[in-house]
Amino acid sequence: MTLSAVEAAPKAELHIHLEGSLEPDMLLALAARNQVAIPYANADQLRAAYDFANLQEFLELYWAGQSVLRTERDFYDLTHAYLARAHRDNVVHVEAHLLPQGHTPRGVPFGAVLDGALAAFDDARHAFGITGGIILGLNRHESQDEAPAVLQSAEPWRDRILALGLEGPEKGNPPSKFTRVYDQARDWGWHLTAHAGEEGPPDYIVEALDMLKVERIDHGVRCEQSPALVRRLAEQGVPLTVCPLSNVMLKVFPALARHNLRRLLQAGLCVTVNSDDPPYFGGYVNANYTQSAAALGLSMAEQRRLVRNGFIAAFIDDEQRRRCLHDLDAAWPSP
Ligand code: ADE
Ligand code: ZN
């Protein structure tokens, strides 16, 4: 099968939840390995449950499925499988969300989560040449009083973690809850990002920028409700890590053809394309690109710009950025 230019191009993926890359077959295999009871007999039954009215409905199923993740080996296998799959989509750089706070209440050691995932990143660098790292997530619906302890637990790994992120149910959980931990992470030299404007209002994007001082916004598509904010995002070059198939599956948009990705790109925003939780939403990063291109009629130049933006938005140094952009130019010359 011949690949389209966007499928064949070297790409960055900046918005993927490692827990959200848990394929039904692996979920069932881990349930058996760890003797965790789950209410599904086979992968088809699991897939049939992937039908969501909104973010909350998705999160409840997603959290329940994660109960099969127990050991360092599980986190290694999960991360390794995702990175191998990303490599098949010609992803060369990955910044992946991981949420220890979602696992430690089950008795999973904090270190098992991080060491398993980090070892898979190390191996993927050798096996596939994939670079990248982990965005340590906080669950926004948990008390802000818990967040400093999460960061404290991460202290032994602080030099190996790329960034701090914020995820979970957005409505009613504004970014301002987390100002103190974002200050701490910034002091440690971590990069900063946060989910905002997925289901929540444009004000949450403004709070993430002004109070958490994030460098990019995960999703952010609801910025369009505020023309002043759209202008600000364009002028300041704040990247959005947009996940088109996720937005359709979670009813942020009624159909891919109604997604605002193209309008945001045309408004001058640094829009990037990502997969969020691929098995749940029907596709990895290449599927997000090709289905969006088809539904929205994206030109080749627009598709190339989206890929290029991935490297512009990545938390990498100037030298690596220059190399990535050079490799993209070689694989897919500018028209
Ligand atoms: N965690 C995993 N996927 C998410 C999403 N789309 N929004 C918020 N939190 C998430
Ligand atoms: Zn996400």
Image (cartoon, rainbow, N blue to C red):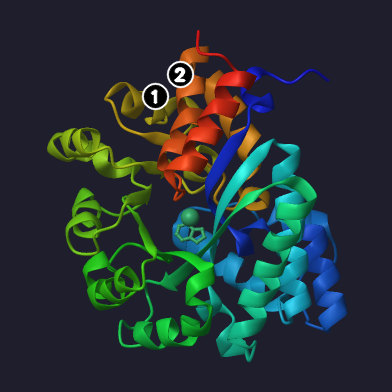
Q: Position of residue 124 (x, y in %)?
A: 73, 55
Secondary element type, mark 1: helix
Q: Residue at x 68, y 18 (%)?
A: 4
Query: Which residue lies under the disc numbered 1?
Result: 262
Q: Position of residue 108 (x, y in %)?
A: 65, 87
233 relative to 110, above or below: above
Separation (CA) of disc 1 from disc 2: 8 Å
66 relative to 2, above or below: below
305 relative to 65, above or below: above
Examine the image and state in which quarter residue 90 appears.
top right
Nearest to the eye among marks 1 and 2: give it.
Answer: 2
Residue at the extreme top: 335
Query: Which residue lies under the disc numbered 2?
Result: 302
- Asked if residue 19 lies left or right of residue 253, the reply is right
Q: Residue at x 69, y 25 (%)?
A: 8
Quarter of the image for the N terminus: give it.
top right
Secondary element type, mark 2: helix
- Asked if residue 38 lies left or right of residue 208, the reply is right
- Number of residues whose C-alpha sits closer than 10 Å to that of mark 2, classed few (under 14), some (14–19) or many (20 or more): some
- The amino acid beneath tag 2 is Glu
Using the image as rendered, state which of residue 264 and residue 260 is in the foreground: 264
Label 1–label 2 contact, CB within 8 A: yes
Q: Residue at x 68, y 50 (%)?
A: 279
17 relative to 110, above or below: above
- Asked if residue 237 lies left or right of residue 297, the reply is left
- The amino acid beneath tag 1 is Arg
Q: Position of residue 68 (x, y in %)?
A: 73, 76
Which of the two discs, 1 and 2, labels the residue nearer the N terminus? 1
